[in-house]
Image (spheres, rainbow, N blue to C red):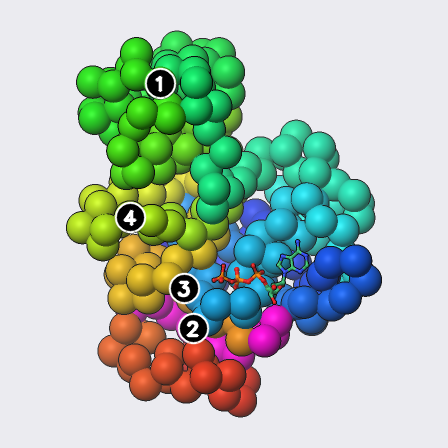
Amino acid sequence: MNTTSKTPVLSCSGLSAGYAGAPVIRDVDLSVHRGEILALLGPNGAGKTTTLLALAGLINRADGSITLDGNTLRSEHSRQAAGHGLVLVPDDRALFTTLTTYENLKLAGRKKAKIDGVFDLFPRLRERTSVAAGSLSGGEQQMLAIGRALVQDPTVLLIDELSMGLAPVIVEQLLPVIRQVADDTGTAVILVEQHVRLALQAADRAVVLAHGAEVLSGDAKELLTHPERIEAAYLGGDRVAAE
Ligand SMILES: Nc1ncnc2c1ncn2[C@@H]1O[C@H](COP(=O)(O)OP(=O)(O)OP(=O)(O)O)[C@@H](O)[C@H]1O
């Protein structure tokens, strides 16, 4: 998609954050536009989850600014971010395991049409309506975690480790649905994903973090044809711009 002329729906500039005063990410600049999927890649411990948590306001930032849908977010901004439609799908999925599929969706969004929309996207969930979330397969649980985010009508969806515990074949089924949501609803997506090739196939752009800093950014399809650049970035190579 051509996003160059539009204002990003979510952006951060100079974002630094960490835990108990210890910095983890530093000086991160990111932006994502409506209907765009940004793949946030990088090796274990690079700071991808920390970046999502800082964007969602679930950890405080040490520095930097975040703008969401034209609003500058305060430092402790999780409620403000949620109010402007930023929804995080956490890597542990955080489902209510004793509640059914339907009850999990109903708790997140009361509108039946929205829940029906999730069942249209994930027909398997419709078949599992009355099953406790804890008894669903890993793939079904991830569908439910995404569905629970979608019933909230997100402006921006932050998806942490879509593939956590899932076979690549399941990830291959889920990613086109995320693409469809972005295309059909204009939801912007930041996708943290370990399967680099699958992530790049679904995404419009990608950013690679290493050691808490951005080391590569570029067009996803372009990067697909240059795996050596991704490899170098994973090894924490010098900052490279592929744009
Ligand atoms: N709650 C926490 N308290 C202290 N340090 C943390 C905490 N969570 C993460 N870290 C540290 O922050 C660094 C970045 O972790 P983060 O989870 O953001 O990386 P990641 O890129 O998402 O990694 P992975 O791909 O392994 O999930 C790691 O060194 C990690 O040990």
Q: Is residue 89 magenta?
A: no
Tag 4: amino acid: Leu
Q: Is residue 150 visible?
A: no
Residue depicted at x 33% and y 43%: 178
Q: Quadrant of ligand 1?
A: bottom right
Residue 210 horizontal/vertical position (percent) = 53, 75
Q: Identify the image quadrant of the C terminus.
A: bottom left
Tag 1: amino acid: Ala
Who is closer to the viewer here, 98 or 105? 98
Residue depicted at x 58% and y 52%: 52
Who is closer to the viewer here, 142 or 75? 142
Mark 4, Cα crowd under 10 Å, few <14 / some 14-19 / many 20+, is some
What residue sits right under mark 2 in the picture? 218
Q: Earlier in the sequence, mark 2 or mark 1?
A: 1
Q: Is the Cβ of the residue at disc 4 closer than 8 Å to that at disc 3?
A: no
Q: Is residue 28 visible?
A: yes
Secondary structure beneath dot 1 equals: loop
As measured in the structure, the alpha-carbon distance from the residue carrying label 4 to the one carrying label 3 is: 23 Å
Segment tinted magenta in the rendering: 211-221
Q: Is residue 169 above or below residue 102?
A: below
What residue sits right under mark 3 in the picture? 205
What residue sits right under mark 1 in the picture? 132
Q: Earlier in the sequence, mark 4 or mark 3?
A: 4
As measured in the structure, the alpha-carbon distance from the residue carrying label 3 to the one carrying label 1 is: 36 Å
Q: Earlier in the sequence, mark 3 or mark 1?
A: 1
As measured in the structure, the alpha-carbon distance from the residue carrying label 3 to the one carrying label 2 is: 6 Å
* Mark identifier at residue 144: none
